[in-house]
Image (spheres, helix red, strand yellow):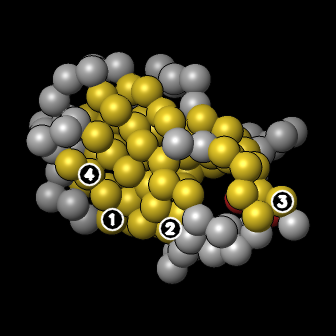
């Protein structure tokens, strides 16, 4: 497994945009799935989006049409473009990796996203 470091979070007004980055310590080329998750205060961590090795994407219904996940294998980085942000998008955002159907049990520090109304 590679180590993942998230960045790009911040404070933004509702309707605004942010782009998160997930930088890997090694190649992500052979990783089956890369994904983003988030955890709001007092809530469980939840799935946001994933992208396969062949760049097939899948999104949670709550972010579909507003968020876009992408990967740059040359830079070993995964991105999450977030548009039309809502206060309910507030939380700590984490990226993760999966070989086969299992997401890693190891999580990074995450990056805080706060959307003000």
Residue under the point 65% across and 69% down: 16
Q: Can you give x and y, in whole percent of width and height, for residue 88 in the image? A: 78, 61
Alpha carbon distance from label 4 to label 1 = 10 Å
Q: Residues within 10 Å of mark 3 (few under 14, many from 20)?
A: some
Position of 54 relative to 64 (above/below): above
**Image marks 4 and 1: residues in contact by CB distance under 8 Å:** no
Residue 57 badge:
1
Q: Is residue 72 left or right of residue 13?
A: left
Where disc 1 sits, the SS reads strand
Alpha carbon distance from label 2 to label 4 = 14 Å
Residue under the point 25% across and 65% down: 56
Residue 67 badge:
2
**Image marks 1 and 2: residues in contact by CB distance under 8 Å:** no
Alpha carbon distance from label 1 to label 2 = 11 Å
Alpha carbon distance from label 4 to label 3 = 28 Å
Looking at the image, which is closer to me, 51 or 79? Answer: 79
In primary-sequence order, the first of circles 1 and 2 is 1
In primary-sequence order, the first of circles 4 and 3 is 4
Q: Can you give x and y, in whole percent of width and height, for residue 9 in the image? A: 60, 43
Is any atom of residue 88 visible in this view?
no
Name the residue beneath numbered marker 3.
116
Residue 71 badge:
4
Position of 64 relative to 7 (above/below): below
């Amino acid at each position: 497994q590679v180590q993942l470091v998230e960045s790009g979070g911040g404070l933004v007004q509702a309707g605004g945009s942010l782009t998160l980055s997930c930088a890997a310590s090694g190649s992500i080329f052979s990783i089956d799935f890369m994904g983003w998750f988030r955890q709001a205060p007092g809530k469980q961590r939840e799935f946001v989006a994933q992208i396969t090795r062949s760049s097939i994407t899948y999104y949670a219904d709550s972010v579909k049409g507003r968020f876009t996940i992408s990967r740059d294998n040359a830079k070993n980085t995964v991105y999450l473009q977030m548009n039309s942000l809502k206060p309910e998008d507030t939380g700590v955002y984490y990226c993760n990796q999966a070989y086969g159907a299992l997401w890693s049990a190891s999580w990074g520090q995450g990056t805080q996203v706060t959307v003000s109304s």
